[in-house]
Image (tube, helix red, strand yellow):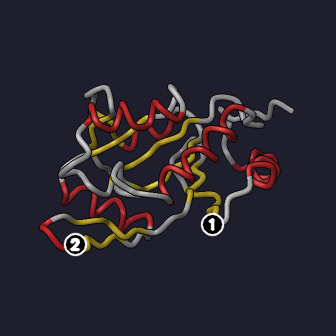
Amino acid sequence: MTDFQLTDSSGRAFTRRDLTRAPALVFFGFTHCPDVCPTTLVKLAQLRRRAPVAGLQVLFISVDPQRDTPSVLGTYVHAFDPQFRGLTGDPQTIARLAANFGVAVNRVELPGGNYTMDHSAVVFVLDDSAHIVAIFTPPFDVAALGADLVRAAPYLGAKARTTT
């Protein structure tokens, strides 16, 4: 993964190096999403609360930086879990990072001048070196995700340890 610089929901810079502090679950989405994003974030909040991996961080990377400012992202992600971090940046950086992860993103124009964003709905599991070690695909079942995290724990790095 190449280096990048985003802004988190507190207005602080967030770079690839920040991904090396702890294992992470990464999901690309947007705050105006009517169903997939909020449903996924509910599941990730449930998973994080009973996470079998200590220190697991959940990152929501916006694919709609035009509308998803740091403060909008903060309000949105913290409604699901106060520990979640929303990340945004300039459109080119977001596009490069999404491509780096293999996430498809497409802006879809709607009648009346509005738009929505089509995007891949997968959750990436990163180790504490920012390497993708697993990919979760829908439908998301919290118990199954937890079991998968236990199996993935040996690959999450020295900072990861299971709590079960």
Q: Is residue 135 above or below residue 110?
A: above
Q: Position of residue 148 (x, y in %)?
A: 78, 54
Q: Position of residue 8 (x, y in %)?
A: 32, 34
Residue 19 percent location from the top left of the image? 47, 40
Q: Is residue 53 left or right of residue 97?
A: right
Q: Amino acid at mark 1?
A: Thr
Secondary structure of residue under mark 2? loop
In-front residue for pair 57/17: 57
Q: Amino acid at mark 2?
A: Leu
Q: Mark 1, residues whose alpha carbon is within 10 Å: few (<14), some, or many (≥20)?
A: few
Quadrant in which the C terminus appears: top right
Q: Residue furthest right?
A: 164
Query: What residue sits right under mark 2 in the picture?
Result: 110
In three-dimensional space, the C-alpha distance between marks 2 and 1, rounded to whole angstroms, equals 27 Å
Q: Is residue 8 above or below residue 34?
A: above
Q: Which residue was labeled with disc 1?
A: 137
Q: Nearer the viewer, residue 155 or 10?
A: 10
The front one of 28 and 40 is 40
Residue at the image position 31 percent from the left and 26 percent from the top: 10
Is 61 in front, or is 138?
138
* Residue at 38%, 49% in the rendered image: 61
Q: Which mark is residue 35?
A: none
Instruction: Give the left or right position of residue 136, taking residue 118 as reference.
Output: right
Q: In which quadrant of the rendered view does residue 52 lie? A: top right
Please identify the quadrant where the N terminus is shown.
bottom left
Could you tell me which secondary element the residue under label 1 belongs to? loop
Residue that protrudes farthest toward the front in the picture: 112
Q: Residue at x 28, y 45 (%)?
A: 88
**Pair 2/1: label in front:** 2
